[in-house]
Image: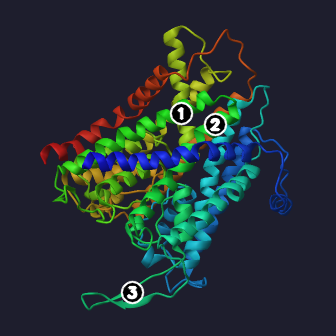
Amino acid sequence: MAWFLTASALLAVAIVLGLIYRPLGDYMAAVFTSGRDLRVERLIYRLCGIDPTRQQSWRRYLASIGAFSLAGFVLLYALLRLQPLLPYSLGMPGMRPDLAFNTAASFVGNTNWQSYSPEQATGYAVQMVGLAVQNFVSAAVSMAVAVALIRGFASLRGRSGLGSFWVDLVRANLRILLPLSVVMAVLLMVGGVIQNLSEPAAITTVSGSTQTMLGGPVASQEAIKMIGTNGGGFFNANSAHPFENPTAWTNLLQVILLLMIPFSMPRMFGTMVGDQRAGLALLITMIVLFAAVYIPLTVFEYAGSGTAPMLAGGAMEGKEQRFGIVGSTLFATATTGTTGGAVNSMHDSYTAFGGLMLMLDMTLGEVAPGGAGSGTYALLILMVIAVFLAALLLGRSPVYLGKRLGVRELKLVSIAILVLPLLALGGMAAGFAIPSVRDDLLDAMSNQGPHGLSEVFYAFVSAAINNGSAFAGLSANDPMLNVLIGVIILLGRFIPIALVLALAGSLAAQGKAATSGELPLHRPQFVVLLVSLIVFITVPVFVPVLLVGPLAEGLMG
C-alpha cells in the first residue's frame, strides 16, 4: 500500500507537469524572445526612462540587477522598521534592526527565511506591499538571469549583448508570474485558502479556551509564494496551516505550482537555443535527481527509523494527518529541491535518514529541479563541467551548442560550484568560532548531540543555497545570527548571479565554434555522466558534517 501511494502521488504530479511542460515552456520562450511590447509595458518603460531596444553587456545587466535589488532591500527594510505607521498594520510593532535586515535580505534574495512568527510580527500592509512584491520581483530576477545565460548560448554572431534586464524583469512579472498567480489564487480560494482583510477575531476553542485567529490576503500570497519558488509563509506553520493549505488536493496543487516553472524551463531552453534534445537532457537530469531523493525519503519515513513515533504505518511526528506520509515527503522533496523553502511538515521531526535526504537535496545545488530560473542556470553551470570532462575523455574539443568552452568559462564555473560549500561550511565555522555568535547559536539550539548539529548545518546550507526552509528546532532570531545568516543569504544570491552573467557574456561574445562535430550530449550515457558528476562534485565536501550529524543520529537510533 505504501509503495502504491508513493508511486501514485509521483505519477499524478508527473502527468500534470508533463501536460504543462510544452505549452508553458514554449510560452516562456516566446515571452523572452518576442520583439513586441504590450501597451502597459511601453507605459512602464516611458515612466522609468527605459529603452527596451537597448542591449546590455553582462556588466551592465549585473549592475541593473544590483541597483534594483538594493532599492528593493532599502524599501523593504524601511517598511519593516516603520510598520506601525502603515495602514492594516494590526498593531504590529516595527522589527528590530537585525531582524529587519535579515528579513529584507531573505526576501530580496528569494530565500524567504523567516526568523520571526508572521502572526506576531507582520501586518497585512507589510505582507502585501513588502513581502508579496518581493515574491514577484525576486523570482523574476532569477528568471531573467537564466534567460541571459540562455541567450549567451543561443547567440551565434558574436554579439556581446544579453538583452535588457528591465525588459526581462517586466515581462517575467506581467506575462508569466502575475497571470499564473491570479488564476492559481482563485483555485486556492476554491480549495478553502482564505483571502480577506478582516481584523483578528477571538474564538472559543473546543476545549473552552479563547484564541485569536488572524485572517488576511493569504491565497494571493500563497500563489506567488509557490509559483515563484519563494516559500515565506503567511503563518508560522507555513503550508501546514489549514488557512494556507486546507486539503490533500490543495497540497498536491501547491506541489505542482512549486515545480511547474522549474520543470518547464528546459523546454524554454531548448526552444531558445534551437535544440530540444539539449532541453530534454536537462529535464531528464532533473527528474532523475528528484526521484532519487523522493523515493528513499518516503521509504525512510514509512520505516520510521530514529526517534519519530510510528503512527498509521509511518513516522507521523510533525506531519499533518490530512497529508499523510506521501503528501509530506512529496512536498518536502519539492521544496528542498527548489528554492521554495515552504513546508507542510516539520523537517526537524523527520527520521534521521529522512532529514539526511532533505539536506542532500539542498547540497546538490538545488538542481532537482531548482528554483524558477536559478535551477536552470545552476544546472547549466554543471553541464559546462560535464561537457568539458566528456570532451577530455574522448579527445574532442569541448563545445556545447556551438560554444567553445575554454579556460575562462571553466574558471567561472569552477568558482561557482565552490560558493555553496564555502558559505555553508564557512558560515557554520564562523558561527561557532566567533564568541558572540557562538553564544547566540548555542542558545538557539533546542537539541544537543548529532541532531543539534543537523539543525545548525541545515540552517546554514538553507541560507547559502537560498532555500529558506529550516529544522525549526533552531530558534535563530538572535541579533548576531540574524546578521550572519542575512549576509550569507546575500552572498549566496549575488555571487552566483555575477558568475553566471560573466559566463553568459563570455559565451555571447563568441561566434560559432569551428568543429568537425559536437559530442552527442543528448544521449542517455551523457545524462548518466551528468547525474553522476553532480553527485560527485556537490556531496563529498559535506560528508564529514553529515557523518557526525544525521548519519550518526540514524546509526545511534
Residue 131 shows in the view: no
Q: CA distance from mark 3 to mark 1?
A: 48 Å
Q: Earlier in the sequence, mark 3 or mark 1?
A: 3
Amino acid type, residue under disc 2 in the picture: Phe
Image x and y of residue 216, in percent: 52, 79
In space, the residues marked 3 and 2 are separated at their CA atoms by 48 Å
Asked whether 204 or 236 is in front, the reply is 204
Secondary structure state at the residue bearing disc 3: strand
What kind of residue is marked 3? Thr
Query: Is 424 above or below relative to 475?
Result: above
- Cβ atoms under marks 3 and 2 closer than 8 Å: no
Please tell me how crowded label 1 is: few (under 14), some (14-19), or many (20+) other residues with Cα within 10 Å: many
- First along the sequence among labels 1 and 2: 2
How far is disc 1 from disc 2 in space, using C-alphas?
9 Å
Circle 1 sits in a helix, a strand or a loop, which is it? helix
333 left or right of 129 in image: left
Q: Residue at x 50, y 18 (%)?
A: 389
Residue holding disc 3: 212
Q: What residue did someone put label 1 on?
A: 282
Q: Residue at x 56, y 40 (%)?
A: 376
Q: SS at mark 2?
A: helix
Q: Quadrant of residue 161?
A: top right
Residue at image mark 2? 269
Q: Residues within 10 Å of mark 2 (few under 14, many from 20)?
A: many
As drawn, which residue projects farthest toward the left? 556
Q: Residue at x 52, y 12 (%)?
A: 392
| Label 1 with label 2: CB-CB less than 8 Å | yes
